[in-house]
Amino acid sequence: MATQMVLSDTDHHDSIFSNIRTSGLNRNTCGAAFGLIGGILAPIFGSVFTVVGWLSGPTWHGFAVQRIGTVLLFLTIPLLLFGAHCLDLSDRKDEQVKRNHLPVEVKHGPNSEGEDSDLERN
């Protein structure tokens, strides 16, 4: 029961791309995209370079492919952490903007002081 209440309160349809559409391209969203995409691509290319280094030797056409592969494999975790941190900063900023936005309710007729106003803040 508690799990259902916790899971129903979360908003799972927000992705990094919808966050970029709503927030625009700023430092946090660009950092999140770079970190998460780099964190996904780094181990793939790192594995490929490492395998090429195993098969052909540590250098291939003058490039130190084994070293490049190892560096890319080690960069995976820091890139993912950086992307997650930037995404958290962007989400925190969006929540702060939503919290500071005051709802406006349209009321018809006179208010408590007898004045006739169309818009009143809650």
Image: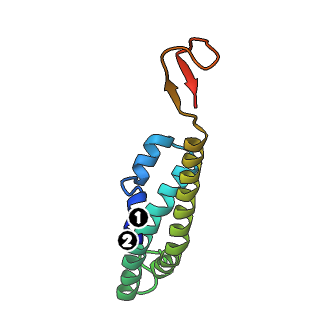
Horizontal arrangement in the rendering, residue 102 relative to residue 58 (left or right) = right
In the figure, residue 37 lies in which quadrant?
bottom left
The residue carrying pointer 2 sits among few (fewer than 14), some (14 to 19) or many (20 or more) residues within 10 Å by Cα, namely few
The residue carrying pointer 1 sits among few (fewer than 14), some (14 to 19) or many (20 or more) residues within 10 Å by Cα, namely few
Residue 55 lies, with reference to residue 60, above or below; the image says below
Mark linked to residue 99: none
At horizontal 36% and vertical 77% (from top left) the residue drawn is 48
Q: Nearer the viewer, residue 2 or 42?
A: 2
At horizontal 36% and vertical 54% (from top left) the residue drawn is 13
Q: Nearer the viewer, residue 24 or 76?
A: 24
Q: What number of labels is visible? A: 2
At horizontal 41% and vertical 55% (from top left) the residue drawn is 11
Mark linked to residue 1: 2
* SS of the residue under disc 2: loop
**At label 2, which amino acid type do we have?**
Met
What residue is shown with label 1? 5
Residue 4, given in percent of the width and then of the height, sits at: 37, 67
Marks 2 and 1 sit apart, C-alpha to C-alpha, by 6 Å
Circles 2 and 1, Cβ within 8 Å, touching? The answer is yes
Residue 115, given in percent of the width and then of the height, sits at: 61, 12
* SS of the residue under disc 1: helix
Residue 56, given in percent of the width and then of the height, sits at: 37, 85
Going by the picture, which residue comes out furthest to the right?
Answer: 113
Q: Nearer the viewer, residue 76 or 90?
A: 90
Horizontal arrangement in the rendering, residue 8 relative to residue 81 (left or right) = left
**At label 1, which amino acid type do we have?**
Met
At horizontal 41% and vertical 87% (from top left) the residue drawn is 57
